[in-house]
Amino acid sequence: KNGTLILERKIKSFNEEKLKKTIEKEAYKEDTKLNSEQERIKNGIEVSNKRHFLIRGVTGSGKTEIYIQLIKRALENGKGSIFLVPEISLTPQMVKRFKKEFGEEVAILHSRLSNIERAKEWYSIYTGDKRVVLGVRSAIFAPVKNLEYIIVDEEHENSYKQDSTPRYNAKYVAIKKAELENAKVVLGSATPSIESYYYAKKGIFQLFEIDHRYKDAKLPEIEIVDMKEEKDSFFSEKLLEEIRGALLRKEQIILLLNRKGYSTLVQCQECGHMEECEHCSIKLNYYASNNSLKCNYCGISKRFLGHCSKCGSKNISFSGRGVERVEEELRKRFPVNIIRVDGDVSKEKNFYENMYNDFLGGKYDIMIGTQMISRGLHFPNVTLVGVINADTIMSIPDFRSGERTYQMITQVAGRAGRGEKKGKVIIQTYQPENYIIEKIQENSYINFYEKEIEKREILFYPPFSKIINIGISSNEENGLEEYCHLVFKEIEHEKVELYGPMKSLVYKVKGRYRCNIFIKGDRREINEYKIFLENKLKKIENKKYRIVVDVDPINLI
Protein backbone atom coordinates (compact mmCIF):
# COMPACT_ATOMS: atom_id res chain seq x y z
CA LYS A 1 0.00 0.00 0.00
CA ASN A 2 2.79 2.39 0.94
CA GLY A 3 4.58 1.52 -2.30
CA THR A 4 1.46 2.37 -4.30
CA LEU A 5 1.09 5.73 -2.54
CA ILE A 6 4.75 6.59 -3.20
CA LEU A 7 4.34 5.65 -6.87
CA GLU A 8 1.17 7.77 -7.16
CA ARG A 9 2.96 10.74 -5.62
CA LYS A 10 5.88 10.35 -8.02
CA ILE A 11 3.53 10.16 -11.02
CA LYS A 12 1.62 13.21 -9.79
CA SER A 13 4.88 15.12 -9.23
CA PHE A 14 6.14 14.10 -12.67
CA ASN A 15 2.91 15.20 -14.36
CA GLU A 16 2.90 18.52 -12.49
CA GLU A 17 6.51 19.17 -13.53
CA LYS A 18 5.72 18.20 -17.12
CA LEU A 19 2.70 20.53 -17.14
CA LYS A 20 4.80 23.34 -15.66
CA LYS A 21 7.44 22.92 -18.38
CA THR A 22 4.75 22.82 -21.09
CA ILE A 23 3.21 26.03 -19.79
CA GLU A 24 6.63 27.67 -19.61
CA LYS A 25 7.51 26.50 -23.12
CA GLU A 26 4.28 27.89 -24.54
CA ALA A 27 4.61 31.17 -22.62
CA TYR A 28 6.22 33.01 -25.53
CA LYS A 29 2.98 32.67 -27.48
CA GLU A 30 1.23 35.04 -25.07
CA ASP A 31 1.94 38.46 -26.53
CA THR A 32 2.72 41.45 -24.38
CA LYS A 33 0.82 44.42 -25.78
CA LEU A 34 3.11 46.86 -27.54
CA ASN A 35 2.18 50.48 -28.06
CA SER A 36 2.02 51.87 -31.60
CA GLU A 37 5.61 53.14 -31.55
CA GLN A 38 7.03 49.83 -30.33
CA GLU A 39 4.92 47.95 -32.87
CA ARG A 40 6.22 50.21 -35.66
CA ILE A 41 9.84 49.48 -34.71
CA LYS A 42 9.26 45.73 -34.32
CA ASN A 43 7.55 45.51 -37.70
CA GLY A 44 10.19 47.72 -39.29
CA ILE A 45 12.98 45.38 -38.19
CA GLU A 46 11.08 42.24 -39.23
CA VAL A 47 10.32 43.41 -42.78
CA SER A 48 13.54 45.34 -43.46
CA ASN A 49 16.08 44.05 -45.95
CA LYS A 50 18.83 45.56 -43.83
CA ARG A 51 20.91 43.48 -41.45
CA HIS A 52 22.02 46.07 -38.85
CA PHE A 53 19.72 48.16 -36.63
CA LEU A 54 20.11 50.69 -33.81
CA ILE A 55 17.32 51.54 -31.41
CA ARG A 56 17.97 54.74 -29.48
CA GLY A 57 15.28 54.90 -26.84
CA VAL A 58 15.29 56.98 -23.67
CA THR A 59 15.58 55.07 -20.39
CA GLY A 60 12.31 53.32 -19.60
CA SER A 61 11.00 53.59 -23.17
CA GLY A 62 10.28 49.85 -23.48
CA LYS A 63 13.13 48.66 -25.67
CA THR A 64 13.18 45.29 -23.88
CA GLU A 65 9.55 44.66 -24.90
CA ILE A 66 10.52 45.11 -28.55
CA TYR A 67 13.41 42.68 -28.19
CA ILE A 68 11.19 40.05 -26.57
CA GLN A 69 8.55 40.30 -29.28
CA LEU A 70 11.21 39.88 -31.98
CA ILE A 71 12.54 36.77 -30.24
CA LYS A 72 9.01 35.37 -29.87
CA ARG A 73 8.28 35.71 -33.58
CA ALA A 74 11.62 34.11 -34.40
CA LEU A 75 10.81 31.14 -32.13
CA GLU A 76 7.42 30.68 -33.75
CA ASN A 77 9.24 30.44 -37.07
CA GLY A 78 11.68 27.87 -35.73
CA LYS A 79 14.53 30.39 -35.43
CA GLY A 80 16.91 31.15 -32.55
CA SER A 81 18.24 34.34 -30.95
CA ILE A 82 21.13 35.59 -28.83
CA PHE A 83 20.46 38.35 -26.30
CA LEU A 84 23.58 39.99 -24.85
CA VAL A 85 23.72 42.06 -21.65
CA PRO A 86 26.89 43.94 -20.69
CA GLU A 87 27.09 43.05 -17.02
CA ILE A 88 26.37 40.00 -14.91
CA SER A 89 24.44 42.27 -12.49
CA LEU A 90 21.69 42.54 -15.13
CA THR A 91 21.39 38.79 -15.56
CA PRO A 92 18.97 38.00 -12.63
CA GLN A 93 16.51 40.64 -13.82
CA MET A 94 16.64 39.39 -17.40
CA VAL A 95 16.63 35.71 -16.39
CA LYS A 96 13.41 36.25 -14.46
CA ARG A 97 11.83 37.98 -17.45
CA PHE A 98 13.10 35.55 -20.07
CA LYS A 99 12.11 32.48 -18.04
CA LYS A 100 8.62 33.92 -17.72
CA GLU A 101 8.41 34.56 -21.45
CA PHE A 102 10.26 31.59 -22.92
CA GLY A 103 10.40 28.91 -20.22
CA GLU A 104 12.81 26.06 -20.95
CA GLU A 105 13.85 27.52 -24.31
CA VAL A 106 16.34 29.83 -22.55
CA ALA A 107 20.02 29.01 -22.01
CA ILE A 108 21.86 31.25 -19.55
CA LEU A 109 25.59 31.91 -20.05
CA HIS A 110 27.76 33.97 -17.71
CA SER A 111 30.96 33.72 -15.66
CA ARG A 112 29.30 32.63 -12.40
CA LEU A 113 28.24 29.24 -13.81
CA SER A 114 30.14 26.15 -12.76
CA ASN A 115 31.91 24.14 -15.49
CA ILE A 116 29.17 21.51 -15.36
CA GLU A 117 26.38 24.12 -15.60
CA ARG A 118 28.12 25.81 -18.52
CA ALA A 119 28.68 22.52 -20.35
CA LYS A 120 25.01 21.57 -19.96
CA GLU A 121 23.86 24.90 -21.36
CA TRP A 122 26.25 24.76 -24.32
CA TYR A 123 25.18 21.20 -25.13
CA SER A 124 21.49 22.15 -25.02
CA ILE A 125 22.21 25.01 -27.45
CA TYR A 126 24.28 22.80 -29.76
CA THR A 127 21.55 20.14 -29.95
CA GLY A 128 18.86 22.75 -30.57
CA ASP A 129 16.94 21.96 -27.36
CA LYS A 130 17.33 25.62 -26.39
CA ARG A 131 17.04 28.28 -29.04
CA VAL A 132 17.29 31.47 -26.96
CA VAL A 133 20.61 32.44 -25.36
CA LEU A 134 20.84 35.10 -22.66
CA GLY A 135 24.31 36.04 -21.52
CA VAL A 136 27.29 38.33 -21.28
CA ARG A 137 29.85 38.94 -24.04
CA SER A 138 31.18 35.36 -24.43
CA ALA A 139 27.62 34.20 -25.19
CA ILE A 140 28.09 35.66 -28.68
CA PHE A 141 29.95 32.45 -29.59
CA ALA A 142 27.02 30.18 -28.66
CA PRO A 143 26.14 27.75 -31.52
CA VAL A 144 22.47 28.70 -31.81
CA LYS A 145 20.57 26.78 -34.47
CA ASN A 146 18.85 28.80 -37.25
CA LEU A 147 19.98 32.11 -35.82
CA GLU A 148 17.59 34.97 -36.60
CA TYR A 149 18.53 37.79 -34.18
CA ILE A 150 21.51 38.95 -32.17
CA ILE A 151 20.38 41.66 -29.77
CA VAL A 152 23.04 43.72 -27.99
CA ASP A 153 21.42 45.53 -25.06
CA GLU A 154 23.13 48.66 -23.68
CA GLU A 155 25.38 48.49 -26.74
CA HIS A 156 27.50 51.44 -25.59
CA GLU A 157 29.00 49.54 -22.65
CA ASN A 158 32.79 49.04 -22.56
CA SER A 159 32.40 45.58 -20.97
CA TYR A 160 31.55 44.12 -24.40
CA LYS A 161 35.26 44.54 -25.18
CA GLN A 162 37.58 41.90 -23.74
CA ASP A 163 40.95 43.44 -22.90
CA SER A 164 42.80 40.17 -22.34
CA THR A 165 43.74 37.57 -24.94
CA PRO A 166 41.82 36.77 -27.06
CA ARG A 167 40.89 40.42 -27.54
CA TYR A 168 37.51 40.96 -29.14
CA ASN A 169 34.50 43.24 -29.00
CA ALA A 170 31.28 41.23 -28.77
CA LYS A 171 29.45 43.98 -30.67
CA TYR A 172 31.70 43.65 -33.71
CA VAL A 173 31.70 39.86 -33.45
CA ALA A 174 27.89 40.04 -33.49
CA ILE A 175 27.97 42.03 -36.75
CA LYS A 176 30.32 39.53 -38.38
CA LYS A 177 28.42 36.50 -37.05
CA ALA A 178 25.18 37.93 -38.45
CA GLU A 179 26.79 38.24 -41.88
CA LEU A 180 28.02 34.64 -41.76
CA GLU A 181 24.70 33.20 -40.56
CA ASN A 182 22.31 35.48 -42.45
CA ALA A 183 20.91 36.91 -39.21
CA LYS A 184 20.03 40.44 -38.04
CA VAL A 185 21.81 42.50 -35.37
CA VAL A 186 19.78 44.85 -33.17
CA LEU A 187 21.80 47.30 -31.05
CA GLY A 188 19.94 49.18 -28.35
CA SER A 189 20.72 51.96 -25.86
CA ALA A 190 19.45 55.19 -24.40
CA THR A 191 22.96 56.55 -24.91
CA PRO A 192 24.50 54.82 -27.95
CA SER A 193 28.22 54.98 -28.53
CA ILE A 194 29.22 57.92 -30.68
CA GLU A 195 30.43 55.52 -33.37
CA SER A 196 27.18 53.53 -33.51
CA TYR A 197 24.99 56.62 -33.70
CA TYR A 198 27.22 58.07 -36.42
CA TYR A 199 26.87 54.88 -38.48
CA ALA A 200 23.12 55.01 -37.97
CA LYS A 201 22.91 58.64 -39.09
CA LYS A 202 24.94 57.70 -42.17
CA GLY A 203 22.51 54.88 -43.00
CA ILE A 204 24.93 52.02 -42.31
CA PHE A 205 22.63 50.95 -39.47
CA GLN A 206 18.87 51.44 -39.77
CA LEU A 207 17.93 53.87 -37.02
CA PHE A 208 14.82 53.82 -34.82
CA GLU A 209 14.32 56.38 -32.05
CA ILE A 210 11.97 56.65 -29.05
CA ASP A 211 11.98 59.97 -27.19
CA HIS A 212 9.44 59.29 -24.46
CA ARG A 213 8.94 56.62 -21.83
CA TYR A 214 6.58 53.65 -21.97
CA LYS A 215 3.00 54.51 -20.99
CA ASP A 216 4.04 58.19 -21.11
CA ALA A 217 5.89 57.98 -17.77
CA LYS A 218 7.76 61.22 -17.11
CA LEU A 219 11.52 61.44 -17.37
CA PRO A 220 13.05 62.42 -14.01
CA GLU A 221 13.73 66.03 -13.14
CA ILE A 222 17.50 66.62 -13.03
CA GLU A 223 19.05 69.16 -10.66
CA ILE A 224 22.73 70.12 -10.62
CA VAL A 225 24.43 71.03 -7.32
CA ASP A 226 27.70 72.99 -7.33
CA MET A 227 29.77 71.34 -4.61
CA LYS A 228 32.15 74.33 -4.40
CA GLU A 229 29.41 76.08 -2.45
CA GLU A 230 28.73 73.19 -0.05
CA LYS A 231 30.21 72.70 3.44
CA ASP A 232 29.90 68.90 3.39
CA SER A 233 32.08 67.20 0.75
CA PHE A 234 29.95 64.02 0.84
CA PHE A 235 26.35 65.18 0.62
CA SER A 236 24.90 68.51 -0.42
CA GLU A 237 22.04 69.97 1.59
CA LYS A 238 19.77 69.42 -1.40
CA LEU A 239 20.60 65.72 -1.68
CA LEU A 240 20.12 65.17 2.07
CA GLU A 241 16.76 66.95 1.91
CA GLU A 242 15.60 64.80 -1.02
CA ILE A 243 16.78 61.58 0.69
CA ARG A 244 14.77 62.47 3.82
CA GLY A 245 11.70 63.19 1.74
CA ALA A 246 11.92 59.93 -0.23
CA LEU A 247 12.39 57.87 2.96
CA LEU A 248 9.38 59.52 4.60
CA ARG A 249 7.30 58.63 1.53
CA LYS A 250 8.55 55.00 1.77
CA GLU A 251 10.28 55.33 -1.60
CA GLN A 252 13.69 53.93 -2.55
CA ILE A 253 16.94 55.66 -3.43
CA ILE A 254 19.99 54.83 -5.58
CA LEU A 255 23.30 56.62 -5.01
CA LEU A 256 26.24 56.36 -7.42
CA LEU A 257 29.95 56.84 -6.70
CA ASN A 258 32.29 55.19 -9.17
CA ARG A 259 35.12 54.53 -6.73
CA LYS A 260 35.62 51.24 -4.92
CA GLY A 261 36.85 50.86 -1.35
CA TYR A 262 36.93 53.27 1.58
CA SER A 263 39.84 55.50 0.58
CA THR A 264 41.93 55.78 -2.58
CA LEU A 265 44.97 57.22 -0.76
CA VAL A 266 46.57 56.15 2.53
CA GLN A 267 49.32 58.55 3.67
CA CYS A 268 51.50 58.88 6.76
CA GLN A 269 51.25 62.34 8.33
CA GLU A 270 54.72 61.98 9.90
CA CYS A 271 57.02 60.94 7.03
CA GLY A 272 54.66 61.53 4.07
CA HIS A 273 54.89 57.92 2.83
CA MET A 274 51.94 56.76 0.70
CA GLU A 275 51.09 53.05 0.64
CA GLU A 276 51.82 51.76 -2.86
CA CYS A 277 51.57 48.40 -4.63
CA GLU A 278 54.85 46.47 -4.87
CA HIS A 279 53.94 45.19 -8.34
CA CYS A 280 52.19 48.23 -9.87
CA SER A 281 52.93 51.95 -9.95
CA ILE A 282 49.64 52.73 -8.28
CA LYS A 283 48.57 53.68 -4.77
CA LEU A 284 46.78 51.06 -2.69
CA ASN A 285 43.10 51.48 -1.85
CA TYR A 286 41.95 51.00 1.72
CA TYR A 287 38.96 48.70 2.26
CA ALA A 288 37.36 49.19 5.68
CA SER A 289 35.01 46.22 5.22
CA ASN A 290 37.89 43.76 5.69
CA ASN A 291 40.58 46.19 6.97
CA SER A 292 42.85 45.63 3.99
CA LEU A 293 44.98 47.49 1.48
CA LYS A 294 44.33 46.40 -2.09
CA CYS A 295 45.62 47.14 -5.58
CA ASN A 296 42.81 47.53 -8.10
CA TYR A 297 45.15 46.56 -10.97
CA CYS A 298 46.88 43.33 -9.92
CA GLY A 299 44.44 42.45 -7.12
CA ILE A 300 47.08 41.93 -4.42
CA SER A 301 45.68 42.44 -0.92
CA LYS A 302 47.29 42.70 2.51
CA ARG A 303 46.02 43.39 6.00
CA PHE A 304 46.23 47.02 7.16
CA LEU A 305 48.06 47.06 10.50
CA GLY A 306 47.05 50.61 11.44
CA HIS A 307 50.48 52.18 11.08
CA CYS A 308 52.87 53.43 8.40
CA SER A 309 54.78 50.60 6.74
CA LYS A 310 57.86 52.85 6.49
CA CYS A 311 58.22 54.67 9.82
CA GLY A 312 55.66 52.91 12.01
CA SER A 313 53.67 56.04 12.85
CA LYS A 314 49.96 55.63 13.59
CA ASN A 315 49.23 59.15 12.36
CA ILE A 316 47.58 58.05 9.11
CA SER A 317 45.26 60.03 6.84
CA PHE A 318 42.68 58.52 4.48
CA SER A 319 41.80 60.69 1.48
CA GLY A 320 40.06 60.16 -1.83
CA ARG A 321 36.71 58.82 -0.64
CA GLY A 322 35.36 55.57 -1.99
CA VAL A 323 31.93 53.98 -1.89
CA GLU A 324 32.57 52.32 1.50
CA ARG A 325 33.32 55.70 3.07
CA VAL A 326 30.18 57.24 1.61
CA GLU A 327 28.17 54.27 2.92
CA GLU A 328 29.63 54.87 6.40
CA GLU A 329 28.69 58.56 6.31
CA LEU A 330 25.23 57.71 5.02
CA ARG A 331 24.58 55.29 7.90
CA LYS A 332 25.48 58.02 10.40
CA ARG A 333 22.73 60.21 8.99
CA PHE A 334 19.98 57.69 8.16
CA PRO A 335 19.20 54.63 10.32
CA VAL A 336 17.66 52.67 7.44
CA ASN A 337 18.49 49.52 5.50
CA ILE A 338 21.32 50.19 3.05
CA ILE A 339 22.92 47.81 0.54
CA ARG A 340 26.28 48.43 -1.11
CA VAL A 341 26.93 47.05 -4.59
CA ASP A 342 30.47 47.01 -5.98
CA GLY A 343 32.92 44.54 -7.43
CA ASP A 344 34.20 43.44 -4.03
CA VAL A 345 30.94 42.53 -2.29
CA SER A 346 29.46 40.88 -5.37
CA LYS A 347 31.76 37.88 -5.69
CA GLU A 348 29.36 35.38 -4.16
CA LYS A 349 27.61 33.25 -6.76
CA ASN A 350 24.04 34.37 -6.01
CA PHE A 351 24.80 37.92 -4.89
CA TYR A 352 23.16 39.67 -7.86
CA GLU A 353 20.04 37.54 -7.75
CA ASN A 354 19.62 38.13 -4.01
CA MET A 355 20.41 41.83 -4.34
CA TYR A 356 17.88 42.31 -7.13
CA ASN A 357 15.08 40.41 -5.39
CA ASP A 358 15.75 41.98 -1.98
CA PHE A 359 15.79 45.54 -3.28
CA LEU A 360 12.80 44.95 -5.53
CA GLY A 361 10.94 43.48 -2.54
CA GLY A 362 11.65 46.53 -0.38
CA LYS A 363 14.12 44.92 2.04
CA TYR A 364 16.49 47.85 1.50
CA ASP A 365 15.71 51.57 1.36
CA ILE A 366 18.94 52.79 -0.21
CA MET A 367 21.30 51.19 -2.73
CA ILE A 368 24.75 52.71 -3.04
CA GLY A 369 27.27 51.44 -5.55
CA THR A 370 29.70 51.88 -8.40
CA GLN A 371 28.95 51.96 -12.13
CA MET A 372 27.42 48.47 -12.14
CA ILE A 373 24.21 49.89 -10.59
CA SER A 374 23.82 52.38 -13.45
CA ARG A 375 22.95 49.75 -16.05
CA GLY A 376 19.45 48.72 -16.95
CA LEU A 377 18.08 47.82 -13.50
CA HIS A 378 14.34 48.34 -13.13
CA PHE A 379 13.00 49.18 -9.65
CA PRO A 380 9.57 50.85 -9.84
CA ASN A 381 9.77 52.28 -6.30
CA VAL A 382 13.04 54.18 -6.91
CA THR A 383 12.17 57.86 -7.13
CA LEU A 384 15.49 59.45 -6.23
CA VAL A 385 18.94 59.01 -7.78
CA GLY A 386 21.97 60.83 -6.43
CA VAL A 387 25.32 61.10 -8.20
CA ILE A 388 27.84 61.77 -5.41
CA ASN A 389 30.69 62.98 -7.62
CA ALA A 390 30.09 63.42 -11.33
CA ASP A 391 33.68 64.47 -12.01
CA THR A 392 35.52 61.18 -11.40
CA ILE A 393 35.47 60.00 -15.05
CA MET A 394 35.76 63.38 -16.80
CA SER A 395 39.30 63.80 -15.45
CA ILE A 396 40.61 60.64 -17.18
CA PRO A 397 42.92 61.57 -20.10
CA ASP A 398 41.02 59.68 -22.80
CA PHE A 399 39.12 61.03 -25.82
CA ARG A 400 36.10 58.97 -24.71
CA SER A 401 35.98 60.29 -21.12
CA GLY A 402 33.23 62.81 -21.90
CA GLU A 403 31.15 60.18 -23.64
CA ARG A 404 31.56 57.75 -20.73
CA THR A 405 30.57 60.42 -18.20
CA TYR A 406 27.45 61.30 -20.17
CA GLN A 407 26.47 57.65 -20.58
CA MET A 408 27.00 56.60 -16.97
CA ILE A 409 25.19 59.53 -15.39
CA THR A 410 22.32 59.46 -17.90
CA GLN A 411 21.92 55.72 -17.40
CA VAL A 412 21.85 55.90 -13.59
CA ALA A 413 19.50 58.90 -13.79
CA GLY A 414 17.19 56.66 -15.80
CA ARG A 415 16.70 54.39 -12.77
CA ALA A 416 14.48 57.10 -11.19
CA GLY A 417 10.74 57.35 -11.74
CA ARG A 418 10.32 54.21 -13.84
CA GLY A 419 7.02 53.34 -12.19
CA GLU A 420 3.99 55.55 -11.63
CA LYS A 421 5.81 57.84 -9.19
CA LYS A 422 7.72 60.89 -10.36
CA GLY A 423 11.53 60.68 -10.29
CA LYS A 424 14.23 63.15 -9.34
CA VAL A 425 18.00 63.16 -9.90
CA ILE A 426 20.58 65.17 -7.96
CA ILE A 427 23.99 65.47 -9.60
CA GLN A 428 26.81 66.75 -7.39
CA THR A 429 29.75 68.26 -9.29
CA TYR A 430 32.57 70.77 -9.02
CA GLN A 431 32.18 71.55 -12.74
CA PRO A 432 28.52 72.57 -13.22
CA GLU A 433 29.47 74.70 -16.24
CA ASN A 434 30.95 71.73 -18.15
CA TYR A 435 29.02 71.10 -21.38
CA ILE A 436 28.66 67.38 -20.51
CA ILE A 437 26.81 68.22 -17.29
CA GLU A 438 24.68 70.77 -19.15
CA LYS A 439 23.66 68.20 -21.81
CA ILE A 440 22.82 65.63 -19.13
CA GLN A 441 20.49 68.14 -17.47
CA GLU A 442 18.90 68.96 -20.82
CA ASN A 443 18.23 65.22 -21.27
CA SER A 444 19.33 65.64 -24.87
CA TYR A 445 21.49 62.90 -26.34
CA ILE A 446 21.23 64.55 -29.76
CA ASN A 447 22.74 67.83 -28.52
CA PHE A 448 25.53 65.95 -26.74
CA TYR A 449 26.22 63.85 -29.82
CA GLU A 450 26.47 66.89 -32.09
CA LYS A 451 28.96 68.56 -29.77
CA GLU A 452 31.02 65.38 -29.38
CA ILE A 453 31.04 64.39 -33.06
CA GLU A 454 32.29 67.87 -33.99
CA LYS A 455 35.29 67.42 -31.65
CA ARG A 456 35.97 63.92 -32.98
CA GLU A 457 36.04 65.16 -36.58
CA ILE A 458 38.44 68.00 -35.80
CA LEU A 459 40.81 65.68 -33.91
CA PHE A 460 40.38 62.80 -36.40
CA TYR A 461 39.20 60.30 -33.78
CA PRO A 462 36.73 57.42 -34.33
CA PRO A 463 34.36 57.18 -36.15
CA PHE A 464 36.36 59.31 -38.59
CA SER A 465 39.42 57.14 -38.10
CA LYS A 466 40.40 53.71 -36.83
CA ILE A 467 42.96 53.34 -34.07
CA ILE A 468 45.42 50.69 -32.95
CA ASN A 469 47.25 50.62 -29.64
CA ILE A 470 50.49 48.65 -29.44
CA GLY A 471 51.43 47.77 -25.87
CA ILE A 472 55.04 46.78 -25.22
CA SER A 473 55.99 45.45 -21.78
CA SER A 474 58.84 43.77 -19.95
CA ASN A 475 59.74 42.52 -16.48
CA GLU A 476 62.91 44.60 -16.77
CA GLU A 477 62.84 48.36 -17.15
CA ASN A 478 66.37 48.52 -18.58
CA GLY A 479 66.28 48.32 -22.34
CA LEU A 480 62.53 48.79 -22.67
CA GLU A 481 62.71 52.36 -23.93
CA GLU A 482 65.36 51.49 -26.54
CA TYR A 483 63.34 48.51 -27.78
CA CYS A 484 60.18 50.65 -28.04
CA HIS A 485 62.02 53.17 -30.21
CA LEU A 486 63.27 50.31 -32.40
CA VAL A 487 59.70 49.04 -32.83
CA PHE A 488 58.45 52.56 -33.57
CA LYS A 489 61.06 53.06 -36.27
CA GLU A 490 60.35 49.68 -37.88
CA ILE A 491 56.57 50.13 -38.06
CA GLU A 492 56.52 53.72 -39.32
CA HIS A 493 54.44 54.15 -42.45
CA GLU A 494 53.56 57.22 -44.49
CA LYS A 495 49.84 56.33 -44.69
CA VAL A 496 49.14 56.33 -40.94
CA GLU A 497 49.89 58.59 -37.97
CA LEU A 498 52.10 57.17 -35.19
CA TYR A 499 52.44 58.67 -31.70
CA GLY A 500 54.94 57.63 -29.05
CA PRO A 501 56.46 55.56 -27.76
CA MET A 502 55.20 56.78 -24.39
CA LYS A 503 54.96 55.32 -20.92
CA SER A 504 51.51 54.00 -19.99
CA LEU A 505 49.55 56.18 -17.59
CA VAL A 506 49.98 53.36 -15.07
CA TYR A 507 53.57 52.53 -15.95
CA LYS A 508 53.99 49.29 -13.98
CA VAL A 509 51.29 46.60 -13.66
CA LYS A 510 51.80 43.10 -12.22
CA GLY A 511 55.55 43.60 -12.23
CA ARG A 512 55.72 44.56 -15.89
CA TYR A 513 56.81 47.98 -17.16
CA ARG A 514 54.59 49.19 -20.00
CA CYS A 515 54.84 51.57 -22.96
CA ASN A 516 52.46 52.33 -25.80
CA ILE A 517 52.57 53.27 -29.46
CA PHE A 518 49.36 54.81 -30.73
CA ILE A 519 48.38 54.53 -34.41
CA LYS A 520 45.63 56.39 -36.23
CA GLY A 521 44.39 56.33 -39.82
CA ASP A 522 41.27 56.03 -41.94
CA ARG A 523 39.56 52.65 -42.25
CA ARG A 524 41.05 51.63 -45.60
CA GLU A 525 44.57 52.69 -44.64
CA ILE A 526 44.45 50.94 -41.27
CA ASN A 527 43.19 47.71 -42.83
CA GLU A 528 46.10 47.75 -45.29
CA TYR A 529 48.54 48.74 -42.54
CA LYS A 530 47.57 45.77 -40.33
CA ILE A 531 49.16 43.35 -42.84
CA PHE A 532 52.34 45.47 -42.95
CA LEU A 533 52.36 45.67 -39.13
CA GLU A 534 52.01 41.92 -38.65
CA ASN A 535 54.97 41.18 -40.92
CA LYS A 536 57.17 43.82 -39.29
CA LEU A 537 56.47 42.67 -35.73
CA LYS A 538 57.36 39.08 -36.61
CA LYS A 539 60.80 40.22 -37.78
CA ILE A 540 61.65 42.19 -34.62
CA GLU A 541 60.16 39.73 -32.11
CA ASN A 542 62.18 39.53 -28.89
CA LYS A 543 61.31 37.08 -26.10
CA LYS A 544 62.37 39.61 -23.49
CA TYR A 545 59.50 41.89 -24.52
CA ARG A 546 55.80 41.23 -24.90
CA ILE A 547 53.96 43.04 -27.69
CA VAL A 548 50.16 43.25 -27.65
CA VAL A 549 48.29 44.73 -30.61
CA ASP A 550 44.85 46.04 -29.72
CA VAL A 551 42.71 47.10 -32.70
CA ASP A 552 39.85 49.48 -31.80
CA PRO A 553 41.00 49.74 -28.15
CA ILE A 554 38.58 50.85 -25.46
CA ASN A 555 41.06 51.18 -22.61
CA LEU A 556 44.01 53.47 -23.39
CA ILE A 557 45.38 53.59 -19.83
Image: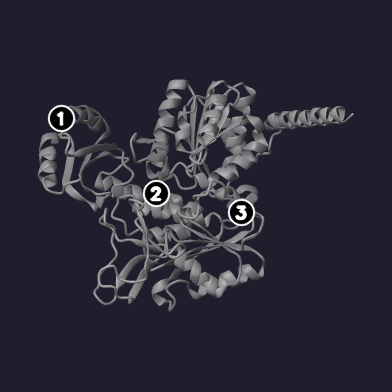
Relative to 439, does residue 556 appear above or below in the rendering? above
Residue 57 seen from this side: no
Image location of residue 241, percent across then percent down: 56, 74
Image location of residue 473, percent across then percent down: 21, 43
Q: Quadrant of residue 68?
A: top right
* Label 3 crowd bin: few (<14), some (14–19), many (20+), radius 10 Å: many
- The residue at 43%/26% (across/down) is 177
Closest to the observer, 350 or 243: 350
Q: Residue furthest front?
A: 2
* Res 83 label: none
The residue at which mark 1 appears reads as: 536
Contact between marks 2 and 1 (CB within 8 A): the answer is: no
**Camera-side mark, 2 or 1:** 1
**Which tag, 1 or 3, sits closer to the chain's start?**
3
Alpha carbon separation for disc pair 1 and 3: 53 Å
* Label 2 crowd bin: few (<14), some (14–19), many (20+), radius 10 Å: many
**Camera-side mark, 1 or 3:** 1
Image location of residue 208, percent across then percent down: 51, 38
Residue 141 seen from this side: yes
Alpha carbon separation for disc pair 3 and 2: 28 Å
- Describe residue 387's horizontal placement relative to residue 20 as left or right: left
The residue at which mark 3 appears reads as: 379
- The residue at 26%/56% (across/down) is 278
Indicate the amino acid at tag 3: Phe
- The residue at 20%/29% (across/down) is 534
Indicate the amino acid at tag 1: Lys
Q: Quadrant of the N terminus?
A: top right
The residue at which mark 2 appears reads as: 449
